[in-house]
Image (cartoon, helix red, strand yellow):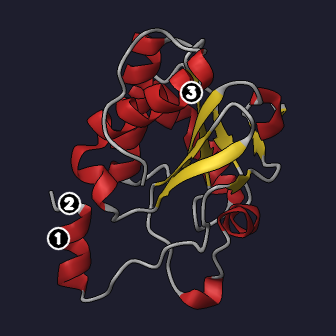
Amino acid sequence: MLNRRTFLALAGSAPLFGQLKPPKPAPELTIILNSGEHLLLSRFRGKVVVLEFLLTTCPHCQTCSAIMQKLYAELGDKVFQPLGAAINPNSMTEARMLVPAYVSNLGLKFPVGWTPREQAYAWLEAQNAQGPVYFPQVVFIDRKGVIRYYFPGGDDFYRNEEANMRRLILELYNENGAGPAQKSGGRKR
């Protein structure tokens, strides 16, 4: 299987990233769960949130979600809250139909639903006219509701995704002395 960088190099095009420039307050986002519940991002203020915009058919998104689940099981919901927002390009009906299998196949225990593509693109500050947006798109939001890190598909972050994700989660959790005495290592992007 090709990794993202190899695919992009072979395709002869660079990924187009959203124009999201952290730090900035996270705008509201609605994720619609299969139960019909409308889950608001603001509901998780006070927690570190890792938000993945994904395509249910994307193997890179599946890998990212599986890593988020592994860290969620290891660190617990007191440390961070993962969220998944599917924006399958063909239709919202497709996303809605494929989310249950996506969640089940990966054994995800965190909320994963769907979001209209236009809403997700606006949230990421990306425009359709600018070209494709590569997935997954991962956003780290601190406990105050501020977007601190953003990693579009194709970013070097994904070369060591699990270690990078763990480091940033613990860094954001440990800010202001609120977390356990764990070292997060690394530096801010």
Q: Position of residue 56 (x, y in %)?
A: 49, 49
Secondary structure type for disc 3: helix
The amino acid on which the numbered mark 1 sits, given as a three-letter code, is Thr
- Image location of residue 188, percent across then percent down: 43, 48
Question: Which residue occupies the foreground of this view, 177 or 189?
Answer: 177
Q: Label for residue 3?
A: 2
Name of the residue lying farthest toward the front: 176
Residue 173, position in %: x, y? 55, 24
Circle 1 sits in a helix, a strand or a loop, which is it?
A: helix
Q: Is residue 9 above or below residue 25?
A: below
Mark 2 surroundings: few (<14), some (14-19) or many (≥20) residues within 10 A: few
Q: Split into 4 quadrants, where in the image is the N terminus?
A: bottom left
Q: Is residue 90 left or right of residue 7?
A: right
Q: Is residue 37 above or below residue 79?
A: below
Q: Nearer the viewer, residue 30 or 80?
A: 80
- Labelled pair 1, 2 in contact (Cβ < 8 Å): yes
Judge whether residue 40 can be spotted in this image: no
In the image, 59 versus 76, the foreground residue is 76
Residue 18, image quadrant: bottom right
Query: What amino acid type is highlighted by mark number 2?
Result: Asn
Question: Horizontal placement of 18 versus 157: left or right?
Answer: right
